[in-house]
Image (cartoon, rainbow, N blue to C red):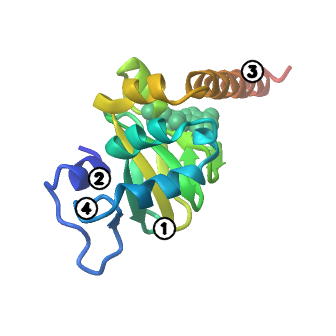
Amino acid sequence: MELITRMMDGSISYDPEGRLEPVSSGPGVKQEDKIERLKEVPVFEACSHRQLRSVARVARVFDVAADTVLARAGEPGDEFFLIIDGTARAEVSAEKRVLLHPGEFFGEMSILDGGPRSATVVADTPLRLLVISRQHFSMLLKDVPGLTQTLLATLSKRVRQAEERAERLGSASTGL
Ligand code: CMP
């Protein structure tokens, strides 16, 4: 089970030194504070206050330390992650690393097709993340204008890059 899932369902405690900190997900945290944070994330720009309120109800905000593994290639995945602050690193293959920056997301592939994680994703720096579980993802697609289109555009870009990479590897191995 992925680290964040275990953090979210409470089956592991947080790091005693406070390296893995849930932020604004506790019952005492005001929804309005979370909504203010959501407003800073570009993908939620077009959301009305009502839409942001429904996102805030289901989104959890986590701080994780650099080097935390958030998704592991080949394992099942049940969360969608959006980067609020910091940089994550998708280790797509032995030679391919992609840096993901604030406003970018990862974890959408397993949520969409139910398959295993396609890459390992690690916190390259300390990260602040918005985490949405599988059960709330379709609500997010319905409530956030333009999110489906952004997801499709990102997936197309990732497929294109994967094909280019496969082509380069193919030419390198045949020497053409
Ligand atoms: P998922 O397969 O659920 O978990 C690993 C994530 O890494 C994947 O979703 C994407 O969000 C991300 N990912 C996979 N391939 C790439 C890529 N080529 N560029 C950027 N991110 C990627």
Q: Earlier in the sequence, mark 1 or mark 2?
A: 2
Calculate the distance from the C-alpha at mark 1 to the C-alpha at mark 2. 14 Å
In the foreground, 16 or 32: 32
Dot 4 alpha-carbon crowd within 10 angstroms: few under 14, some 14 to 19, many 20 or more: few
Q: Is residue 39 left or right of residue 2?
A: right
- The residue drawn where x is 30% and y is 58% is 25
Dot 1 alpha-carbon crowd within 10 angstroms: few under 14, some 14 to 19, many 20 or more: some
Asked if the residues shown at circle 4 and circle 2 are in contact, with their CB atoms under 8 angstroms apart, the answer is no
In the foreground, 157 or 38: 38
Query: Which part of the image, by quadrant, shows the C terminus?
Result: top right
Asked if the residues shown at circle 4 and circle 1 are in contact, with their CB atoms under 8 angstroms apart, the answer is no
**Secondary element at image label 3:** helix
Q: Which mark is residue 66?
A: 1
Q: Which mark is residue 3?
A: 2
Calculate the distance from the C-alpha at mark 4 to the C-alpha at mark 3. 48 Å
Q: Earlier in the sequence, mark 4 or mark 2?
A: 2
Residue under label 3, please give it.
167
Residue flagged by tag 3: what amino acid is it? Glu
Locate residue 41, reporting x and y percent: 59, 49
Q: Which mark is residue 26?
A: 4
Q: Is residue 31 left or right of residue 168?
A: left
Q: Earlier in the sequence, mark 1 or mark 3?
A: 1
Q: Earlier in the sequence, mark 4 or mark 1?
A: 4
Whether ligand 1 has any atom under 8 Å from the Cβ at mark 1 is answered as: no
